[in-house]
Image: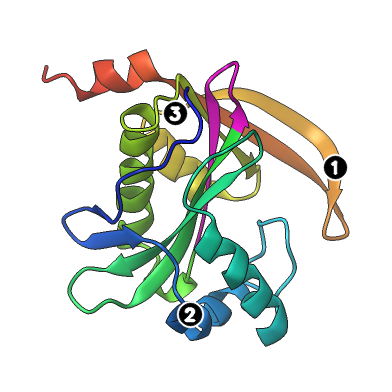
Amino acid sequence: MQMPVAPRLPLRTPRLVLRQFRPDDLEPLLAFHSDPQAVRYVPFPPRDRDAVATVLQRKMAGTAWRQEGDLLELAVARADDGAVLGDVLLALRSVEHETVEVGYIFAPEHGGRGYATEAVRALLEVAFGQLGARRVTARVDARNTASRRLLERLGLRLEAQLLENEWFKGELTSETDYAMLAREWRAAAQPR
Protein backbone atom coordinates (compact mmCIF):
# COMPACT_ATOMS: atom_id res chain seq x y z
CA MET A 1 0.00 0.00 0.00
CA GLN A 2 1.36 3.37 -1.00
CA MET A 3 0.66 6.31 1.31
CA PRO A 4 -1.18 8.61 1.15
CA VAL A 5 -4.20 6.84 -0.32
CA ALA A 6 -7.82 7.92 -0.58
CA PRO A 7 -10.86 6.54 -2.37
CA ARG A 8 -12.62 8.42 -5.12
CA LEU A 9 -15.70 9.86 -3.44
CA PRO A 10 -18.60 9.68 -3.26
CA LEU A 11 -19.20 5.94 -3.48
CA ARG A 12 -22.55 5.00 -5.00
CA THR A 13 -24.61 1.86 -4.62
CA PRO A 14 -28.10 1.20 -5.98
CA ARG A 15 -29.75 2.88 -2.97
CA LEU A 16 -26.98 4.72 -1.14
CA VAL A 17 -24.31 7.37 -1.38
CA LEU A 18 -21.24 7.04 0.86
CA ARG A 19 -19.73 10.50 1.05
CA GLN A 20 -17.57 12.79 3.11
CA PHE A 21 -19.16 14.17 6.23
CA ARG A 22 -20.16 17.83 6.17
CA PRO A 23 -21.31 20.35 8.81
CA ASP A 24 -25.02 19.81 8.16
CA ASP A 25 -24.64 16.15 9.23
CA LEU A 26 -24.61 17.19 12.89
CA GLU A 27 -28.33 16.58 13.56
CA PRO A 28 -28.64 13.15 11.91
CA LEU A 29 -25.35 12.03 13.46
CA LEU A 30 -26.52 13.23 16.87
CA ALA A 31 -29.78 11.29 16.45
CA PHE A 32 -28.05 7.92 16.42
CA HIS A 33 -24.80 8.70 18.26
CA SER A 34 -26.93 9.78 21.27
CA ASP A 35 -29.22 6.73 21.08
CA PRO A 36 -28.32 4.09 23.73
CA GLN A 37 -29.69 1.32 21.49
CA ALA A 38 -27.57 2.42 18.50
CA VAL A 39 -24.33 2.68 20.50
CA ARG A 40 -24.84 -0.43 22.62
CA TYR A 41 -22.04 -2.38 20.90
CA VAL A 42 -19.71 0.43 19.82
CA PRO A 43 -16.76 1.67 21.89
CA PHE A 44 -18.31 4.94 23.01
CA PRO A 45 -21.23 5.92 25.22
CA PRO A 46 -24.22 7.92 23.98
CA ARG A 47 -22.84 11.29 22.93
CA ASP A 48 -24.26 14.74 23.57
CA ARG A 49 -24.33 17.56 21.00
CA ASP A 50 -20.87 18.90 21.95
CA ALA A 51 -19.27 15.47 21.71
CA VAL A 52 -20.90 14.78 18.33
CA ALA A 53 -19.78 18.21 17.05
CA THR A 54 -16.20 17.38 18.03
CA VAL A 55 -16.39 13.92 16.44
CA LEU A 56 -17.94 15.41 13.29
CA GLN A 57 -14.89 17.66 12.84
CA ARG A 58 -12.65 14.57 12.92
CA LYS A 59 -14.94 12.71 10.54
CA MET A 60 -14.91 15.54 8.01
CA ALA A 61 -11.11 15.34 7.97
CA GLY A 62 -10.96 11.51 7.82
CA THR A 63 -11.00 10.87 4.08
CA ALA A 64 -7.47 9.61 3.41
CA TRP A 65 -4.84 7.38 4.94
CA ARG A 66 -1.45 8.91 5.58
CA GLN A 67 -0.20 6.54 8.30
CA GLU A 68 -1.24 3.54 10.37
CA GLY A 69 -4.19 4.28 12.60
CA ASP A 70 -5.81 6.72 10.17
CA LEU A 71 -9.53 6.39 9.52
CA LEU A 72 -11.59 6.89 6.38
CA GLU A 73 -14.97 7.92 7.76
CA LEU A 74 -18.00 8.30 5.54
CA ALA A 75 -21.62 9.27 5.95
CA VAL A 76 -24.12 6.79 4.52
CA ALA A 77 -27.00 8.66 2.89
CA ARG A 78 -30.03 7.38 1.04
CA ALA A 79 -29.61 8.22 -2.66
CA ASP A 80 -33.21 9.30 -3.23
CA ASP A 81 -33.59 11.85 -0.42
CA GLY A 82 -30.12 12.34 1.10
CA ALA A 83 -31.20 11.19 4.58
CA VAL A 84 -28.16 10.11 6.63
CA LEU A 85 -28.72 6.54 7.83
CA GLY A 86 -25.32 5.58 9.15
CA ASP A 87 -21.66 6.12 9.66
CA VAL A 88 -18.97 3.76 8.29
CA LEU A 89 -15.22 3.60 8.50
CA LEU A 90 -12.15 1.86 7.24
CA ALA A 91 -9.26 1.96 9.73
CA LEU A 92 -5.73 1.39 8.46
CA ARG A 93 -4.38 -1.17 10.93
CA SER A 94 -1.12 -2.15 9.18
CA VAL A 95 0.66 -0.76 6.13
CA GLU A 96 3.19 -3.60 6.18
CA HIS A 97 0.51 -6.29 6.33
CA GLU A 98 -1.96 -4.36 4.15
CA THR A 99 -4.67 -4.81 6.77
CA VAL A 100 -7.78 -2.68 7.20
CA GLU A 101 -10.57 -2.88 9.76
CA VAL A 102 -14.18 -2.10 8.85
CA GLY A 103 -16.60 -0.48 11.29
CA TYR A 104 -20.14 0.84 11.12
CA ILE A 105 -23.08 2.20 13.07
CA PHE A 106 -26.58 2.77 11.72
CA ALA A 107 -29.69 4.46 13.04
CA PRO A 108 -31.88 1.67 14.48
CA GLU A 109 -35.00 2.89 12.69
CA HIS A 110 -33.37 2.05 9.36
CA GLY A 111 -32.48 -1.52 10.35
CA GLY A 112 -33.72 -4.61 8.57
CA ARG A 113 -33.72 -3.08 5.09
CA GLY A 114 -30.26 -4.14 3.94
CA TYR A 115 -28.72 -0.65 4.06
CA ALA A 116 -25.84 -1.71 6.32
CA THR A 117 -25.07 -4.74 4.14
CA GLU A 118 -25.10 -2.58 1.01
CA ALA A 119 -22.84 0.06 2.59
CA VAL A 120 -20.33 -2.42 4.02
CA ARG A 121 -20.21 -4.27 0.67
CA ALA A 122 -19.26 -0.93 -0.96
CA LEU A 123 -16.54 -0.44 1.69
CA LEU A 124 -15.12 -3.90 0.96
CA GLU A 125 -15.07 -3.16 -2.77
CA VAL A 126 -13.10 0.02 -2.11
CA ALA A 127 -10.78 -1.60 0.44
CA PHE A 128 -9.85 -4.47 -1.86
CA GLY A 129 -9.97 -2.36 -5.02
CA GLN A 130 -8.97 1.31 -4.93
CA LEU A 131 -7.13 1.13 -1.60
CA GLY A 132 -5.21 -2.10 -2.23
CA ALA A 133 -5.90 -3.90 1.06
CA ARG A 134 -4.87 -7.54 1.25
CA ARG A 135 -6.94 -8.28 4.36
CA VAL A 136 -10.03 -6.74 5.95
CA THR A 137 -11.04 -7.49 9.52
CA ALA A 138 -14.01 -6.70 11.75
CA ARG A 139 -14.31 -7.00 15.53
CA VAL A 140 -17.83 -7.50 16.89
CA ASP A 141 -19.33 -7.87 20.34
CA ALA A 142 -20.43 -11.52 20.45
CA ARG A 143 -23.93 -10.45 21.56
CA ASN A 144 -24.42 -8.39 18.40
CA THR A 145 -26.02 -11.09 16.28
CA ALA A 146 -27.26 -8.65 13.61
CA SER A 147 -23.73 -7.44 12.95
CA ARG A 148 -22.34 -10.95 12.93
CA ARG A 149 -24.98 -12.03 10.38
CA LEU A 150 -24.15 -9.01 8.21
CA LEU A 151 -20.46 -9.95 8.08
CA GLU A 152 -21.25 -13.59 7.36
CA ARG A 153 -23.64 -12.58 4.54
CA LEU A 154 -20.77 -10.65 2.97
CA GLY A 155 -18.48 -13.68 3.17
CA LEU A 156 -16.22 -12.71 6.05
CA ARG A 157 -15.11 -15.74 7.97
CA LEU A 158 -15.12 -16.14 11.72
CA GLU A 159 -11.48 -16.26 12.80
CA ALA A 160 -11.60 -15.98 16.58
CA GLN A 161 -13.91 -16.01 19.55
CA LEU A 162 -12.37 -14.20 22.49
CA LEU A 163 -14.34 -15.28 25.53
CA GLU A 164 -14.84 -12.75 28.30
CA ASN A 165 -11.92 -10.77 26.91
CA GLU A 166 -12.77 -7.29 28.16
CA TRP A 167 -14.91 -5.14 30.36
CA PHE A 168 -17.15 -3.16 28.03
CA LYS A 169 -19.58 -0.58 29.37
CA GLY A 170 -19.58 -2.24 32.77
CA GLU A 171 -20.06 -5.80 31.49
CA LEU A 172 -17.59 -8.60 30.92
CA THR A 173 -18.03 -9.32 27.22
CA SER A 174 -16.80 -11.64 24.50
CA GLU A 175 -15.59 -10.60 21.06
CA THR A 176 -15.89 -12.28 17.68
CA ASP A 177 -13.29 -11.49 15.04
CA TYR A 178 -14.00 -11.81 11.33
CA ALA A 179 -11.74 -11.44 8.30
CA MET A 180 -11.54 -11.75 4.55
CA LEU A 181 -8.60 -11.78 2.15
CA ALA A 182 -8.55 -9.96 -1.17
CA ARG A 183 -8.30 -13.28 -3.04
CA GLU A 184 -11.40 -14.56 -1.21
CA TRP A 185 -13.28 -11.38 -2.14
CA ARG A 186 -12.28 -11.76 -5.80
CA ALA A 187 -13.21 -15.47 -5.83
CA ALA A 188 -16.63 -14.72 -4.31
CA ALA A 189 -17.24 -12.09 -7.01
CA GLN A 190 -16.62 -14.56 -9.85
CA PRO A 191 -19.78 -15.85 -11.53
CA ARG A 192 -20.47 -19.50 -10.81
Residue 191: which disc? none
Q: How is the image coloured?
A: rainbow
| Residue 48 in view in this figure | no
Q: Residue flagged by tag 1: what amino acid is it?
A: Glu
Disc number lying in front (3 or 2): 2
Q: Residue flagged by tag 3: what amino acid is it?
A: Leu
Rendered location of residue 164, percent (x, y): 83, 37
Q: Is residue 166 left or right of residue 156?
A: right
User: What residue range appears in magenta?
Assistant: 93-105
Q: Residue 99 colored magenta?
A: yes
Q: Can you tell which quarter of the image residue 51 is in?
A: bottom right
Q: Earlier in the sequence, mark 1 or mark 2?
A: 2
Q: Earlier in the sequence, mark 3 or mark 2?
A: 2
Q: How many marks?
A: 3
Question: Would you call the spot at circle 2 few (<14 residues within 10 Å), some (14-19), or many (20 or more)?
Answer: few
Question: Would you call the spot at circle 3 few (<14 residues within 10 Å), some (14-19), or many (20 or more)?
Answer: many
Determine which residue is flagged by label 2: 23
Determine which residue is flagged by label 1: 166
Rendered location of residue 104, percent (x, y): 51, 54
Q: Is residue 120 left or right of residue 145?
A: left
Q: Is residue 122 left or right of residue 90?
A: left
Determine which residue is flagged by label 3: 156
